[in-house]
Amino acid sequence: MGILTGWAQTVLYAPAIVASLSAYFAILFNNFFGLSQQWQLLVAILTILFITGINLLDNRVPAAFAVITTSIKLLPIIAVIAYGLFFGKVDALNQSVATVTATPSGGFGMAVLATLFAYDGWATLTNMGGELKNPQKNLPRAIVIGILIVVVAYAGISYGMMRAMPANEIVRLGDNATFGVVTQAFGKLGGRLLTIIILISILGTINGKLMALPRMTFAMAEDGVLPKWLAKVNRFNEPIGSILFLTVTASLLQFTASADWLSNIAVFIIWIFYTATFVGLFILRHRDKQAAQVAEPLQELESIFQCQVIRGCH
């Protein structure tokens, strides 16, 4: 099942998700600078090529780019949370929406796909395991801490927005609710700055995908499951064959469908394989009790709890 998941990630998920992200970037970029729709395709492809160029350099360059973009994207989240907590006048926990427009058939499913997309980074992170120091210890820790940060950020910004703006108004504004809160807090300049930060955030996400996803392709090529040219590395020891394959396929997908369709189909397909792999992993571990055990983050929490119990008894 792992090989099938790798094939799905290489051929379907990776190109579709990079293509959709670059298309979203192009849409926002065109709207911000007032460009016509005919520029969207060119901007999307140039975006992919730009991030590809970064990832063909020494791995410290894309790593630094990831740190910078992540730090920048946290700024508006912190600002909205702080504004809602200290200046919001709405009772966030006792609101109700009087009238909500019903979504079309399948709306709930689309919402689930969007949520799965938001939390998808934890799975991509495992592709970088071979380049981490002490991955058995650090990889589970990074996954747990990363997911917790995302959960806290989403919960915090949701609470901050509910403190700053009534629920009915948030429903009315829909996708523009965040812009509404930022404009309310910091004026029109704040709304413009938020757009710039979102653009930077998307670039950071594309960079993260181009850092991690080609590693799966590279590993499969080294094992002989994919063509050997995909295992080629450049002088910086970066998997140039796999990176260029992803760049070309993602660029070609720009001609096929909308950003929404690409992201939905990518997440839907890969989660079928994720689920099958998870089930298969439990079956294999049940059958082979002597297999090397993977470090489990909960073991550390269990040890801490046991120490506290023993300490309390004394």
Image (tube, rainbow, N blue to C red):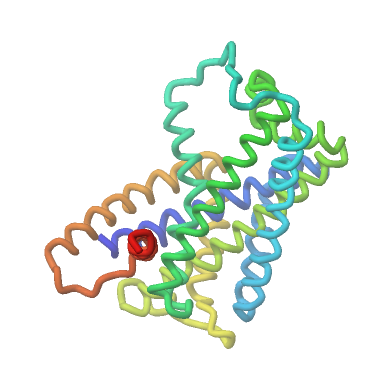
Residue in the image at 33% along x and 59% along y? 5
Residue in the image at 53% along x and 42% along y? 257
- Is 295 in front, or is 117? 295
- Is 252 in front, or is 103? 103
Residue 72 picture location, percent across and down: 72, 57
Residue in the image at 32% along x and 52% along y? 273
Furthest residue in direction front, as rendered:
314
Furthest residue in direction bottom, as rendered:
235
Residue 69 picture location, percent across and down: 69, 60
Residue in the image at 77% along x and 49% along y? 196
- Is 3 in front, or is 37? 3
Q: Where, quadrant-wise, is the N terminus in this rendering?
A: bottom left
Residue 314 picture location, percent across and down: 35, 64
Q: How many marks?
A: 0
The correct choice, above or below, for 304 with respect to 223 in the image is: above
The correct choice, above or below, for 245 with respect to 224 in the image is: above
Residue 245 picture location, percent across and down: 50, 67
